[in-house]
Image (tube, coloured by chain):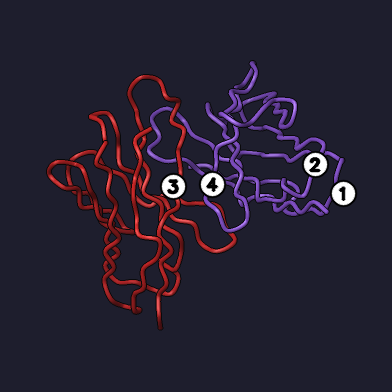
Chain colours: A purple, B red
Amino acid sequence: SAVISQKPSRDICQRGTSLTIQCQVDSQVTMMFWYRQQPGQSLTLIATANQGSEATYESGFVIDKFPISRPNLTFSTLTVSNMSPEDSSIYLCSVGQGGWDEQFFGPGTRLTVL
Amino acid sequence: DAKTTQPNSMESNEEEPVHLPCNHSTISGTDYIHWYRQLPSQGPEYVIHGLTSNVNNRMASLAIAEDRKSSTLILHRATLRDAAVYYCILRDVGGGSNYKLTFGKGTLLTVNP
């Protein structure tokens, strides 16, 4: 199993600014993922954070808008850049490992952009 | 990724069994059927998964049709804490899909006291 923490838990930001969200895991994991959950919607995968290489982005998401770092096997960051009100969402980190049946999710970061 | 179809919402009474259906008619041979749930204001949590045979764990049971085109998550005795959005997800473990999960809209389960 894995315990995941995210910082900040919530934030209110002004449009045009950037916010970096941190994801910390209590054990080394192979795979880390970043999801977005817009108000009242399901989760959408943004990207897979790869340790030691660039993240792999899903269709509709680009590195300039959502740069991701993965410096080691227990930590990742997601930056939401040049924010607009449409970026108001919950951002969730999840982790997986080869041989695990399940993924574990963090509590999420609730972002409001004014 | 193969898609799943679930009812938007279902309602149950506390202490009664709940059967949550999921259709996945385009499932492939390497797709596992996973169920996650998301309690209010929390991240999703794993419930159960299976490939062909019915599965049981401490949280729920998973009944898989013989042709694998549908499945049913069974909560044997619903409690108020089971009120959540339940997601049925197909996870392809063949071909190097790196285990990513594709969430559909899910079923909002309401449990009445």
**Label 3 sits on residue:** B104
Q: Is residue B13 above or below residue B32?
A: below
Q: CA distance from mark 3 to mark 2?
A: 26 Å
Tell me which label, 2 or 1, sits earlier in the chain: 1
Q: Secondary structure at mark 2?
A: loop
Label 4 resides on the chain identified as A
Give the Cα separation between the discs numbered 3 and 4. 8 Å
Kind of residue indicated by mark 4: Leu
User: Residue A18 vs residue B15: left or right?
Assistant: right
Three-letter residue code for mark 1: Gln
Q: Are marks 4 and 2 in contact (CB under 8 Å)?
A: no
**Circles 2 and 1: CB atoms closer than 8 Å:** yes
Check if mark 3's residue and mark 1's residue have beta carbons within 8 Å.
no
Mark 3, residues whose alpha carbon is within 10 Å: few (<14), some, or many (≥20)? some
Check disc 2 and report the residue beneath it: A83
- Circle nearer the N terminus (4, 2): 4
Residue underneath mark 1: A14
A86 or A26: nearer the viewer: A86
> Which percent across, then down, holds residue B108?
43, 63
Whether marks 3 and 1 lie on the same chain: no
Residue appearing at x 24%, y 41% in the figure:
B25
- The residues tagged by marks 2 and 1 sit, at their Cα atoms, a distance apart of 7 Å
Residue at the spot of label 4? A43
Q: Which quarter of the rendered picture does the C terminus of chain B lie within?
A: bottom left
Q: Residue at x 84, y 50 (%)?
A: A13
Residue at image coords 45%, 52%: B105
Q: Where A84 falls versus B77 (above or below)?
A: above
Q: Residues within 10 Å of mark 1 (few under 14, many from 20)?
A: some
Residue B52 point in image, percent of width and height: 18, 40
Q: Amino acid at mark 2?
A: Met
Q: Secondary structure at mark 1?
A: loop
